[in-house]
Amino acid sequence: LAVDGVVYAATINGLAALDGTDWTVLLDETFVNLPAANIGVLASLSDGTLLLGTTRGLALYKDGAVTAVPDVTGSIADIFVTPDDQIHVVSFPNGQPGGYFHYDGSSWNFRPNTDFPMTSLRAVMVDNEDTVWFALGDTGLGGGIFRIVP
């Protein structure tokens, strides 16, 4: 993920940044409020805040500080941010509820993975008509697409 000329890399051990020619480790397992050091998904808000999708939930990273988002649980599979900074997240359950989480600018809304035709939510995106699209798939059962029309 590139933001303001800096390339960010999610790793199984945290977050690193490439600014020019030098890599810097920004986050590892020692950071307070980071749900898990294993970061698999990155996204950014318009103000440069990074969204960190970990194996134990979501966190925000801004100006060297980490803030956990307790409303978003599970192992994060994908994050999609709209131009107006609405956040869409899908996650797998891993001892915590998994499903679809949506931040509308003021609060988080949750729809459990059991409300979908297949319980493995793999990816999420929103089109220009605000339809939310999901890629679904279960091992051995194939996959599919599901949508929520506004």
Image (cartoon, rainbow, N blue to C red):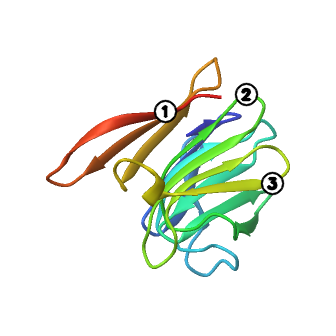
**Which amino acid type is shown beneath numbered disc 3?**
Ser
Residue on which the image places disc 2: 83
Which residue appears at 55% of the width and 40% of the height? Answer: 1
Is label 3 in a helix, a strand or a loop? loop
Seen from the viewer's position, the closer of residues 106 and 25 is 106
Q: Which residue is mark 3?
A: 107
Q: Earlier in the sequence, mark 2 or mark 1?
A: 2
* Badge 2 density bin: few <14, some 14–19, many ≥20, Cα 10 Å: few
Kind of residue indicated by mark 1: Arg
Q: Quadrant of the C terminus?
A: top right
Q: Are marks 1 and 3 in contact (CB under 8 Å)?
A: no
Residues tagged 3 and 2 counted as in contact (Cβ below 8 A)? no
The residue located at (54%, 43%) in the rendering is 21
Q: Residues within 10 Å of mark 3 (few under 14, many from 20)?
A: few
Mark number, residue 64: none
Q: CA distance from mark 3 to mark 2?
A: 17 Å
The numbered dot on residue 147 is 1
Q: Position of residue 80 (x, y in %)?
A: 58, 39
Could you tell whether 124 is left or right of 43 in the image? left
Element class at badge 2: loop
How many residues crowd around disc 1 within 10 Å: few (fewer than 14), some, or many (20 or more)? some
Q: Nearer the viewer, mark 2 or mark 1?
A: 1
Considering every residue shown, the one lying at the far left of the view is 140
Q: Is residue 62 above or below residue 71?
A: above
Q: Is residue 124 above or below residue 33?
A: above
